[in-house]
Image (tube, rainbow, N blue to C red):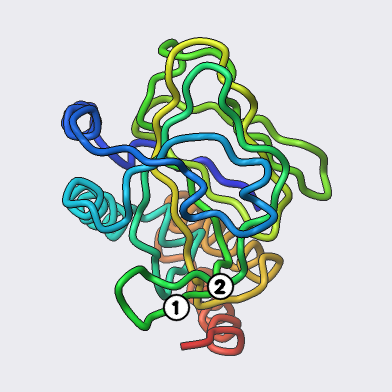
Amino acid sequence: MLIQIHDVLSPAQVAEARRKLDAAEWLDGKITAGHQSARVKDNAQVPENHDVAEGLGDIILTALQKHSLFLAAALPLRVFPPLFNRYEKGQSFGNHVDNAIRQISGTGHRIRTDLSATLFLSAPHEYEGGELLVEDTYGVHSVKLPAGHMVLYPASSLHNVRPVTRGARIASFFWIQSMVRHDADRALLFDLDLTIQRLNQDAPDHPSAVQLTGVYHNLLRRWAEL
């Protein structure tokens, strides 16, 4: 399930993030890549424990806690602290699958990466190329979103970032451990949640909404891992 989540950050928040990132320290992006991914990764990254990364990460996490579409789609249990990368002319990230387990830097905490997220901080007109390509059973999906918008997709997906040919592609990326491990189960719950919301809008107080809500929570109760 690949979902676009709009307006995670406001234009003012994006502008402030860009201002701080422009002044931050950037290192080789291979510092967070696994052995296989490091062979095909060519970008720059702000260090995980950098003050800018931590501060902006907190802003993103606070925004996500209030975003109903993200909460419905991800059913988040734990979210990895957001990281920040930059692709400039000629840089790319070849085909790879994200590591299944990530350890949070400086802690003993680890998360299982059920979902991957990319939050775009550069507007599409600021760079050429740099599309995120995500492969699933329905084919390859090309994603290039406005600044402040985010894409959410299974971390088990084969994906890559196409070479940037002009400008710079700046984004935040991170992973989510969901309460519901399997993507197919999350997709079913998400569709059911949206159906209940539409029913409540179209036919308020319809008794079927109560029944469907019960089905939703009973499925969540069966599949959730806390």
Q: Residue at x 38, y 24 (%)?
A: 122
Depth check, front residue: 186 or 11: 11
The image position of residue 215, as x and y in percent, is: 58, 80
Q: Disc 1 versus disc 2: distance between alpha carbons?
A: 7 Å
The amino acid type found where label 2 is placed reads Ile
The image position of residue 47, as x and y in percent, is: 32, 50
Q: Which residue is mark 1?
A: 110
Q: Is residue 164 left or right of residue 5?
A: right
Look at the picture and state if 25 lies above or below 156.
above
Q: Is residue 110 left or right of residue 26?
A: right
Label 2 neighbour load within 10 Å: few <14, some 14-19, many 20+: few
The amino acid type found where label 1 is placed reads Arg
Label 1 neighbour load within 10 Å: few <14, some 14-19, many 20+: some
Look at the picture and state if 155 lies above or below 219.
above
The image position of residue 41, as x and y in percent, is: 60, 41
Among the 4 quarters of the image, the one containing residue 108: bottom left
Secondary structure at badge 2 equals strand
Look at the picture and state if 152 lies above or below 167.
below
Among the 4 quarters of the image, the one containing residue 97: bottom right
Q: Specify which label sits upstream in the sequence, 1 or 2.
A: 2
Secondary structure at badge 1 equals strand
Q: Residue at x 75, y 44 (%)?
A: 135
Which numbered tag is attached to residue 101?
A: 2
In contact (CB < 8 Å): disc 1 and disc 2: yes
